[in-house]
Amino acid sequence: MGDYLRLLTADDRDVPLASLQRAVPFGAVWSVDHPGMLGNYLAIGPEAEDLHDVWATIERNPVGPNTLGAEEVAEFIDSLESGGPPSASRWLADYLERVREIYAIRIYPESIGRRPEAIDAVYAVRSALRDEVGGVGQWDDHGFTNEDDRLVWVGASARLKGRTDAAILDESTGLWVPVELDLDDPRARAAFLRGELPEPGRPARRG
C-alpha cells in the first residue's frame, strides 16, 4: 500500500470533529488549523497537539474550478484507462465527476513502525469519515473501492497480494456483485481486470 489513501465524496458538508475523536480506540485526533473544529488539516497521533510523532494527517481538499482537488480528480479519471475492470472504469469516471471533497490521508510509516497497532486508529478515523459522508476510496499503488468499500478497480501493473473483498459491476442491472479476490492468483486477477465473474462453486486456479 502506498503512503496515501483517499476518500472521494460528493458530500461536502462539515464533519463534526468530535465524531472522529470518538472513533479512535486510542491516541488522539485534532485539528491543526482550528482547535476544536474540523479545519482543512487534521493530525492523528499518540497525544493531541504533539506533532513530533504523528501517525497520519488528513487534508481536506474541496473540488471546484481551479482547485487542487479538481486537478487530482482529473488525474484519477485519466488513470482509469490503465486498469480495470472496464465496467468499473466507466462507473468511476461518472462518479468522480460528481466528487466535491477529497480527504487525503497521509500515512507516516516510520511513526507507524514504532507502534504498528496505530494503523488501526488511522483506519478507524477513515471509517468514521466514510460513515459521515460516504464516498469511494482511492489507495496509492492499490486501486479504488466502491461505496461499500470493496475493491472494484486495480491498475494493471499494481503489485497487490493476499485476499480481499472485491466487487464487479453488472452493468445490465447496475448492481455490484461481491467476490473474494485472490490477488496472489494471476488468473483470478487477470479475470477480474477483464470484469469476468468467477464460476459458481469453482475454486480459483493458480497459475
Image: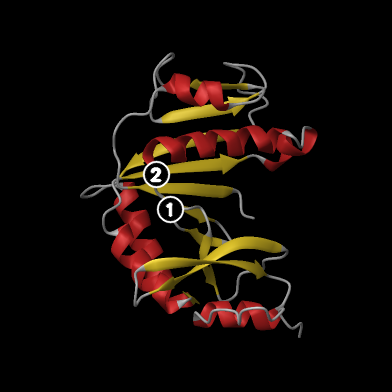
Mark 1 lies on a secondary structure that is loop
Q: Please, is residue 46 above or below residue 100 in the view?
A: above
Q: Is residue 112 left or right of residue 152?
A: right
Question: Pointers 2 and 1 in contact (CB under 8 A)?
Answer: yes
Farthest right residue in view: 114
Left or right: residue 150 versus residue 59 is right
The foreground one among 199 and 124 is 199
> Considering the numbered disc 2 on the image, is that residue within a helix, a strand or a loop?
loop
Q: Which residue is mark 1?
A: 147
Confirm whether residue 32 shows in the render.
Answer: no
| Amino acid type at image mark 2 | Gly
Closest to the observer, 126 or 164: 164
Residue 19: horizontal and vertical position, in percent?
Answer: 46, 24
- Mark earlier in primary sequence (2, 1): 2
Q: Residue furthest left?
A: 65
Q: Residues within 10 Å of mark 1 (few under 14, many from 20)?
A: some
Q: Quadrant of the C terminus?
A: bottom right
Q: Which residue corresponds to mark 2?
A: 134
Give the colour scheme of this rendering. Answer: secondary structure
Residue 198 seen in this snapshot = yes
